[in-house]
Structure formats: C-alpha cells, structure tokens
Amino acid sequence: MLCGNKKQSSYNFVTATLDGNLFYGNSEKKALELRALDGTGRLNVTKTEFGELLPSPRESDPPPQFCPAQDKLQCFQT
C-alpha cells in the first residue's frame, strides 16, 4: 500500500535530478577549481590526442584512494 495513493509516479526527464558532486566537487572551493569559469558551465579539460579528458590530479593533491588503475593509469581530478 502506498499510503492510500494507488497511482504510482515515476521520474522522467523533466523531474529527474542528477547529483553532480562527483563531477563538480563537493565544496564551493573544489567546484571553482574544476570549472572552466568561461560562462559555458563546462568543466576544465585537458586536450589530448584522444579528445578532451578531465584533468589529471595535481601533484599537490593527495593520492587517490579509489583508483584501482593508479599503478598503470592516472585517475581524473574530480
């Protein structure tokens, strides 16, 4: 029983929300570091031969805790 409401509703493209903390940072400071700040709302990117990729972590960043490929590949800065 759905609290007396027999009509089930679901999210759609109009009502769905996306938690962008993973990409846009979990603090205002980190968000400003990650964003391009050019008025487009885009993230900073690194241009490579494979296209635009998220930036690699800076050397001053702490080592990534959840990057299983860190011994072979670098994780991205987010």
Image (cartoon, rainbow, N blue to C red):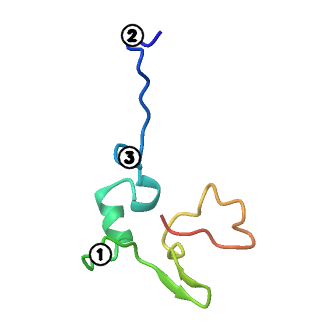
Q: Residue furthest front?
A: 7
Rendered location of residue 65, percent (x, y) = 61, 55
Looking at marks 3 and 1 on the same chain, the residue that comes earlier in the sequence is marked by 3
Q: Residue furthest right?
A: 72
Which amino acid, mark 2?
Cys
The residue drawn where x is 51% and y is 74% is 54
2 or 54, nearer to the observer: 2
- For the residues bearing labels 3 and 1, Cβ distance under 8 angstroms: no
Residue 13 - label: none
Residue 3 - label: 2
20 or 6, nearer to the observer: 6
Label 3 vs label 2, nearer the camera: 2
Residue 17 - label: 3
Against 14, residue 45 (above or below) is below
Against 57, residue 13 (above or below) is above
Which amino acid, mark 3?
Thr
Which amino acid, mark 1?
Thr
Q: Is residue 32 left or right of residue 25?
A: left
Against 34, residue 65 (above or below) is above
SS at circle 2: loop
